[in-house]
Amino acid sequence: MRLKLKNNHTMVFGLKGSGKSNWVQYVLNQPAYQAHLMYDVCREHEPLRCYLPEHRRGDKAIAEFNEVLNRMIIEVEREQRPEVLAIEEVSRLAPNRGGSPESLLELIDLNRHYGVGVVGVARRPAQVDTDLVELADNLIIFKLTGKNDYRRLESEKRGLGDAARELGEYEYLVVNGKREYETHRPVPKMNTTGTL
Protein backbone atom coordinates (compact mmCIF):
# COMPACT_ATOMS: atom_id res chain seq x y z
CA MET A 1 0.00 0.00 0.00
CA ARG A 2 1.55 3.27 -1.10
CA LEU A 3 1.14 6.38 1.05
CA LYS A 4 0.79 9.78 -0.62
CA LEU A 5 0.67 12.93 1.53
CA LYS A 6 0.64 15.60 -1.18
CA ASN A 7 -2.89 16.77 -2.04
CA ASN A 8 -4.34 14.35 0.52
CA HIS A 9 -5.60 14.51 4.08
CA THR A 10 -3.89 12.15 6.54
CA MET A 11 -4.47 11.61 10.25
CA VAL A 12 -1.77 10.11 12.51
CA PHE A 13 -2.79 8.62 15.87
CA GLY A 14 -0.85 6.97 18.67
CA LEU A 15 -0.31 7.04 22.39
CA LYS A 16 2.59 8.94 23.92
CA GLY A 17 5.82 7.12 23.14
CA SER A 18 4.27 4.99 20.39
CA GLY A 19 6.45 6.41 17.61
CA LYS A 20 4.08 8.86 15.90
CA SER A 21 6.30 11.95 16.28
CA ASN A 22 9.35 10.05 15.05
CA TRP A 23 7.27 8.81 12.07
CA VAL A 24 6.24 12.38 11.21
CA GLN A 25 9.85 13.60 11.37
CA TYR A 26 11.08 10.65 9.32
CA VAL A 27 8.45 11.10 6.60
CA LEU A 28 8.76 14.89 6.37
CA ASN A 29 12.54 14.52 6.03
CA GLN A 30 12.12 12.44 2.87
CA PRO A 31 13.02 14.26 -0.37
CA ALA A 32 9.41 14.13 -1.60
CA TYR A 33 8.21 16.19 1.37
CA GLN A 34 10.98 18.77 1.86
CA ALA A 35 8.48 21.60 1.18
CA HIS A 36 6.57 21.19 4.44
CA LEU A 37 5.43 23.25 7.39
CA MET A 38 4.92 21.77 10.87
CA TYR A 39 2.45 23.64 13.09
CA ASP A 40 4.32 22.57 16.20
CA VAL A 41 2.15 23.13 19.26
CA CYS A 42 4.36 20.97 21.51
CA ARG A 43 7.67 22.29 20.18
CA GLU A 44 9.12 18.84 19.57
CA HIS A 45 9.87 18.99 15.85
CA GLU A 46 12.57 21.66 15.68
CA PRO A 47 14.63 19.90 12.98
CA LEU A 48 11.64 20.44 10.68
CA ARG A 49 10.43 23.72 9.17
CA CYS A 50 8.15 24.75 12.02
CA TYR A 51 5.75 27.42 13.08
CA LEU A 52 5.69 27.61 16.90
CA PRO A 53 2.31 28.99 17.96
CA GLU A 54 2.05 31.36 20.89
CA HIS A 55 -1.40 30.06 21.87
CA ARG A 56 -2.12 26.38 22.44
CA ARG A 57 -5.87 26.20 23.19
CA GLY A 58 -9.12 28.07 22.85
CA ASP A 59 -10.24 30.99 20.72
CA LYS A 60 -6.81 32.67 20.62
CA ALA A 61 -5.24 29.43 19.34
CA ILE A 62 -7.86 29.15 16.58
CA ALA A 63 -7.40 32.80 15.61
CA GLU A 64 -3.62 32.33 15.43
CA PHE A 65 -4.03 29.15 13.35
CA ASN A 66 -6.39 30.95 10.94
CA GLU A 67 -3.87 33.78 10.57
CA VAL A 68 -1.02 31.34 9.83
CA LEU A 69 -3.16 29.42 7.35
CA ASN A 70 -4.07 32.61 5.50
CA ARG A 71 -0.56 34.04 5.54
CA MET A 72 1.33 30.89 4.58
CA ILE A 73 -1.10 29.01 2.35
CA ILE A 74 -4.24 30.76 1.17
CA GLU A 75 -2.85 34.23 0.37
CA VAL A 76 0.41 33.13 -1.28
CA GLU A 77 1.23 31.86 -4.75
CA ARG A 78 1.06 28.11 -5.19
CA GLU A 79 4.83 27.83 -5.75
CA GLN A 80 5.49 29.42 -2.35
CA ARG A 81 3.12 27.19 -0.36
CA PRO A 82 4.31 24.19 1.59
CA GLU A 83 3.27 20.96 -0.10
CA VAL A 84 2.44 19.40 3.27
CA LEU A 85 1.05 21.13 6.36
CA ALA A 86 1.43 18.94 9.45
CA ILE A 87 -0.48 19.96 12.58
CA GLU A 88 0.79 18.53 15.86
CA GLU A 89 -1.85 17.95 18.56
CA VAL A 90 -4.65 18.80 16.11
CA SER A 91 -7.16 17.80 18.82
CA ARG A 92 -6.38 21.13 20.53
CA LEU A 93 -7.68 23.00 17.48
CA ALA A 94 -10.38 20.49 16.50
CA PRO A 95 -11.66 18.64 19.57
CA ASN A 96 -14.28 15.91 19.23
CA ARG A 97 -17.06 17.93 20.82
CA GLY A 98 -15.92 21.34 19.64
CA GLY A 99 -15.66 20.87 15.89
CA SER A 100 -12.94 22.09 13.55
CA PRO A 101 -12.06 25.65 12.58
CA GLU A 102 -13.82 26.47 9.31
CA SER A 103 -10.48 27.35 7.72
CA LEU A 104 -9.12 23.86 8.43
CA LEU A 105 -12.19 22.16 6.97
CA GLU A 106 -11.96 24.40 3.90
CA LEU A 107 -8.29 23.52 3.43
CA ILE A 108 -9.09 19.81 3.70
CA ASP A 109 -12.02 20.13 1.29
CA LEU A 110 -9.95 22.11 -1.23
CA ASN A 111 -6.46 20.76 -0.55
CA ARG A 112 -5.98 19.64 -4.17
CA HIS A 113 -6.89 23.16 -5.33
CA TYR A 114 -4.33 24.65 -2.94
CA GLY A 115 -1.78 21.93 -3.73
CA VAL A 116 -1.30 21.22 -0.02
CA GLY A 117 -1.54 17.93 1.83
CA VAL A 118 -2.79 18.13 5.43
CA VAL A 119 -1.43 15.82 8.14
CA GLY A 120 -3.17 15.97 11.51
CA VAL A 121 -1.34 14.39 14.46
CA ALA A 122 -3.07 13.47 17.72
CA ARG A 123 -2.84 10.90 20.47
CA ARG A 124 -6.36 9.55 20.24
CA PRO A 125 -8.97 9.45 17.45
CA ALA A 126 -11.73 9.72 20.07
CA GLN A 127 -10.44 13.21 20.99
CA VAL A 128 -10.52 14.61 17.43
CA ASP A 129 -13.43 16.10 15.50
CA THR A 130 -15.15 13.20 13.75
CA ASP A 131 -15.08 15.03 10.39
CA LEU A 132 -11.27 15.04 10.39
CA VAL A 133 -11.18 11.27 10.81
CA GLU A 134 -14.00 10.43 8.41
CA LEU A 135 -12.70 12.75 5.66
CA ALA A 136 -9.13 11.44 5.88
CA ASP A 137 -7.67 9.85 2.76
CA ASN A 138 -5.17 8.00 4.97
CA LEU A 139 -4.96 6.99 8.61
CA ILE A 140 -1.64 6.15 10.25
CA ILE A 141 -2.34 4.34 13.51
CA PHE A 142 0.16 3.45 16.19
CA LYS A 143 -0.76 1.44 19.27
CA LEU A 144 -4.05 2.50 20.87
CA THR A 145 -5.73 0.79 23.81
CA GLY A 146 -8.64 2.97 24.97
CA LYS A 147 -12.19 1.68 24.59
CA ASN A 148 -13.42 4.92 22.96
CA ASP A 149 -10.55 4.80 20.46
CA TYR A 150 -11.40 1.16 19.78
CA ARG A 151 -15.02 2.07 19.04
CA ARG A 152 -13.97 4.99 16.85
CA LEU A 153 -11.66 2.77 14.78
CA GLU A 154 -14.24 -0.01 14.55
CA SER A 155 -16.71 2.56 13.14
CA GLU A 156 -14.20 3.14 10.32
CA LYS A 157 -13.62 -0.57 9.58
CA ARG A 158 -14.52 -3.72 11.48
CA GLY A 159 -11.31 -5.23 12.92
CA LEU A 160 -9.33 -1.96 12.82
CA GLY A 161 -9.64 -1.45 16.58
CA ASP A 162 -8.32 -4.96 17.26
CA ALA A 163 -5.45 -4.43 14.83
CA ALA A 164 -4.45 -1.21 16.64
CA ARG A 165 -4.47 -2.97 20.02
CA GLU A 166 -2.24 -5.78 18.73
CA LEU A 167 0.53 -3.61 17.28
CA GLY A 168 4.05 -4.20 18.55
CA GLU A 169 6.40 -1.47 19.74
CA TYR A 170 6.63 1.32 17.13
CA GLU A 171 4.68 -0.70 14.54
CA TYR A 172 1.88 1.12 12.79
CA LEU A 173 -1.05 0.59 10.47
CA VAL A 174 -1.45 2.39 7.15
CA VAL A 175 -5.14 2.70 6.32
CA ASN A 176 -6.24 3.96 2.90
CA GLY A 177 -9.43 5.74 1.83
CA LYS A 178 -11.22 2.41 1.26
CA ARG A 179 -10.21 1.59 4.83
CA GLU A 180 -8.03 -1.31 3.76
CA TYR A 181 -5.05 -1.57 6.07
CA GLU A 182 -1.71 -3.20 6.55
CA THR A 183 0.86 -3.32 9.33
CA HIS A 184 4.25 -1.64 8.87
CA ARG A 185 7.53 -2.06 10.72
CA PRO A 186 8.95 0.85 12.72
CA VAL A 187 10.69 3.62 10.78
CA PRO A 188 14.33 4.40 11.67
CA LYS A 189 14.79 6.47 14.81
CA MET A 190 15.52 10.15 14.14
CA ASN A 191 17.96 12.02 16.35
CA THR A 192 17.52 15.54 17.72
CA THR A 193 19.01 17.10 14.59
CA GLY A 194 16.43 15.38 12.38
CA THR A 195 18.84 12.86 10.88
CA LEU A 196 19.04 9.08 11.13
Image: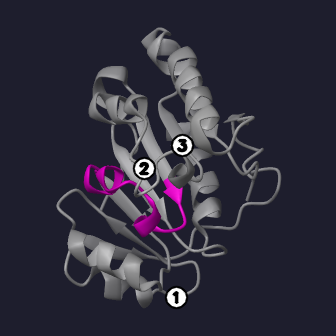
Which amino acid lies under the numbered mark 3 shown in the image of this protein? Ala
Would you name the residue on which mark 1 appears?
168
User: Compared with residue 136, is residue 139 higher up or lower down, i.e. above or below?
Assistant: below
Residue under pointer 3? 86
What residue range appears in magenta? 121-137
- Work out whether residue 157 or residue 83 is closer to the camera in this orientation and state it: 157
The answer to whether 155 is drawn above or below residue 100 in the figure is: below
Q: Report if residue 122 lies within the magenta region.
A: yes
Which is in the foreground here, disc 3 or disc 2?
2
- In percent of width and height, residue 29 lies at 62, 46
In this rendering, is residue 121 above or below 71?
Answer: below
Closer mark to the observer between disc 1 and disc 3:
3
Q: Which quadrant does the C terminus fall into?
A: bottom right
Q: Which residue is mark 2?
A: 98
* Label located before the other in sequence (3 or 2): 3
Position of residue 73 measured from the top left corner of the image (x, y, whole percent) = 49, 20
User: In what element is the residue under mark 3?
Assistant: strand
- In whole angstroms, how far apart are the C-alphas of marks 1 and 3? 25 Å
Residue 1 in sight from this viewpoint: yes
Q: Please, what is the three-letter code of the amino acid marked with disc 1?
A: Gly
Could you tell me which residue is drawn at 42 percent across and 91 percent down?
166
Residue 155, image quadrant: bottom left
Answer whether labels 3 and 2 touch (C-beta < 8 Å): no
